[in-house]
Amino acid sequence: MRATVCGTVLVVLSLCVGHGARAQEPTSREERELAGHHFMPSGRLPDPFVTTHARFRTAGGMADGFQATFEVPGADSTRVTSGDIGFFGLDFEYQQNLFERASARLSLEGNARVGVDNASVLSSGLSSTYGVELEGKYRVLRYTKTVLTAHAIFAQKSLFGLNPLQFAEGIVEDGYDDDDTIVIEDNLSRIVLGPGMAWAPRPWLGFTGHALVGPADPFNDVGDDTAFRWAITGDVDFKPLVGFPIGIMGAFDYDSLPEVDNDFVEGVNSYTFQAAYTGRDEFSIGLEIIHSDVKQSDLLDDFGSTLVSLNSRYYF
């Protein structure tokens, strides 16, 4: 229901702010320009433009207040341990414009997570997530100030790591057997579909949004689930205003089924700030800071994470 409402709102808004005449067919480099505004791309959020580009991203950060529960041996009680976690990630993507109105994107991603103190090393261990994401886009309409695009995204990820707390609990509960392993391996897949749009009311101001929903098979889950993602961004380019080639972007997004070990995480609200260089139409580089409030499974308290990434994108 939420996905349907958000998708309907995006479509209605795009039609309302279209202002009549359709824009001429743009070249790939002109795709991200509406009404003289060049939209600043995010390193982690999809955009509604069917460009041809290559993107590189390097990211690192910390999460504080991570908690995990465990049973106390010999006592009928549960305790909670907490600590900090470090993150590191790399990804590369290439998107190709197809027939002027569509595009296909391939993204290769790798992320690592490790506890940085005794409590978090014990409870969360060390893990890495890696895999591929494929996206198809089709531009439904394009006006002078507005674009509406249909998205279909398929993700296939693998998880590999060490979980000493789970290993110890299995031994304490019923002794060591072949089912007790310190190594964890699992796979995740999901397909989400929905509309995305962009609107540029001024040459220095632009907004984008998307609402995506679809089936998913998450990590450590015996059945299928539903993934729901939505986001809204706004960016200001100071180049048309004062001639200074710097822009800023703010965003909010929600992911009901993040691509992490869902024994611990079941929903993420994220706030993004980016400062980017806007001096060249064919090139963008930006520093992105993402703060996320992470809902933990079976716990009342959320924990926060902060990720800093350097994103570069070249448009062909």
Image (tube, rainbow, N blue to C red):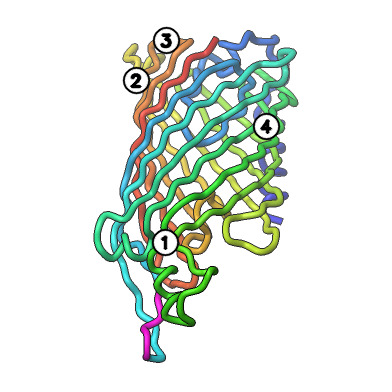
Spatial separation of the CA atoms under disc 1 and disc 2: 44 Å
Query: Mark 4–mark 1 contact, CB under 8 Å?
Result: no
Q: Is residue 210 above or below residue 92?
A: below
Mark 4, Cα crowd under 10 Å, few <14 / some 14-19 / many 20+, is many
Q: Which of the two residues, 243 or 195, is positioned nearer the viewer here?
A: 195
Q: Please provide percent x and percent y for residue 96.
A: 63, 17
> Can you tell which of label 1 and label 3 is closer to the viewer?
1
Tell me the residue at 57%/44% (across/down): 157
Q: Quick one: label 3 or label 2, which is nearer the N terminus?
A: 2
For the residues labelled 3 and 4, the Cα–Cα distance comes to 27 Å
Q: Which residue is mark 3?
A: 280
Residue 96 included in the magenta stretch of the image: no
Q: Which residue is mark 2?
A: 246
Q: Residue at x 43, y 68 (%)?
A: 167
What kind of secondary structure does the magenta stretch mostly adopt? loop
Q: Amino acid at mark 3?
A: Arg
Start and end of the magenta stretch? 70-74
Q: Which residue is mark 4?
A: 14
Residue 47 in view of the camera = yes
